[in-house]
Image (cartoon, coloured by chain):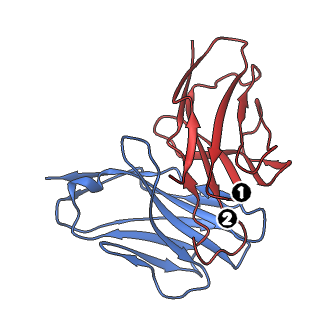
Amino acid sequence: DGGITQSPKYLFRKEGQNVTLSCEQNLNHDAMYWYRQDPGQGLRLIYYSQIVNDFQKGDIAEGYSVSREKKESFPLTVTSAQKNPTAFYLCASSHIGRDGLSGNTIYFGEGSWLTVV
Amino acid sequence: AQTVTQSQPEMSVQEAETVTLSCTYDTSESDYYLFWYKQPPSRQMILVIRQEAYKQQNATENRFSVNFQKAAKSFSLKISDSQLGDAAMYFCAHREIYNNNDMRFGAGTRLTVKP
């Protein structure tokens, strides 16, 4: 099935530990995104990438890092520098530019819950 | 970066009635897309409807329609014949096409449907 796969669904982080959230897509999309959602809040953009080996910071990039070595994969590392990482994380992907087929729709994975213990 | 504002944190509607959710945005671009996404308790983001800025005709998807006012930078969602399954968080989103290509979301509106 085509889609976006995020793993793990639930992750626990100890203080001072780095953790990595996986995101894989088989939709042949050029662009991939990471959003953070706090309880009762909207989605805030962490990082996005429009092409392999290139990515841009979003609104809340501090304490996070990403890589884009393959078109299909866009992992997010939550570093120990992120002081309040407990949140729901959503990965997304889309075509770029004007895309008549999808209307530039961004498609989302099912999300990952990260909790600090 | 562009901003998206949803001024109604919560709304409620009686089953079978109509409700309108508000959204305004700020952008310096003339060509962009606008979206409404629904997020039920499962947290899955579901596309409800999308609108291309260069199209003057308002988008419609079954019971869902939008009122797109480009000059006012307003993009409201109307849900007709509300159903219990419509209860969810609704997010308005704006996406530029040629500048950065990123997407920004509003803070959301929690919709409750009363039986």
Task: Answer above or below: position of A101 versus A112.
Answer: below
Q: Is residue B53 left or right of residue B66?
A: right
Q: Amino acid at mark 1?
A: Ala
Secondary element at image label 1:
strand
First-in-chain label (1 vs 2): 1
Q: Find residue A41 and report its horizontal and vertical position in percent.
A: 51, 41
The numbered mark 2 sits on a residue in which chain? A
Display colour for chain B: blue
Image colour for chain A is red
- Disc 1 marks which residue? A31
- How many residues crowd mark 1 within 10 Å: few (<14), some (14–19), many (20+)? many
- Which image quadrant for residue A13? top right
Q: Is residue B97 left or right of residue A69?
A: left
Q: Quadrant of residue A102?
A: bottom right
- Residue position marked by numbered label 2 in the rendering: A95
Task: Classify residue B25 as left or right of residue B45.
Answer: right
Question: Would you place residue B21 above or below residue B58 in this image?
Answer: above
Location of the N terminus of chain B by quadrant is bottom right
The amino acid pointed to by label 2 is His
Residue drawn 18% across the image and 59% down it: B14
Q: Residue furthest front?
A: A1
Decide which of A85, A100 is in the foreground and name it: A100
Query: Residue at 73% across / 63% down in the picture?
Result: B101
* Picture disc at residue A45: none
Q: Is residue A89 visible?
A: no
Residue A52 image offset from top left, x and y in percent: 82, 51
Seen from this angle, which residue lies furthest bottom? B56
Residue B45 is at least partly visible in this image: yes
**Could you tell me if the residues under marks 1 and 2 are in contact, i.e. CB atoms within 8 Å?**
yes
Give the chain of mark 1: A
At 54% from the left edge and 51% from the top edge, which residue is drawn? Answer: A3
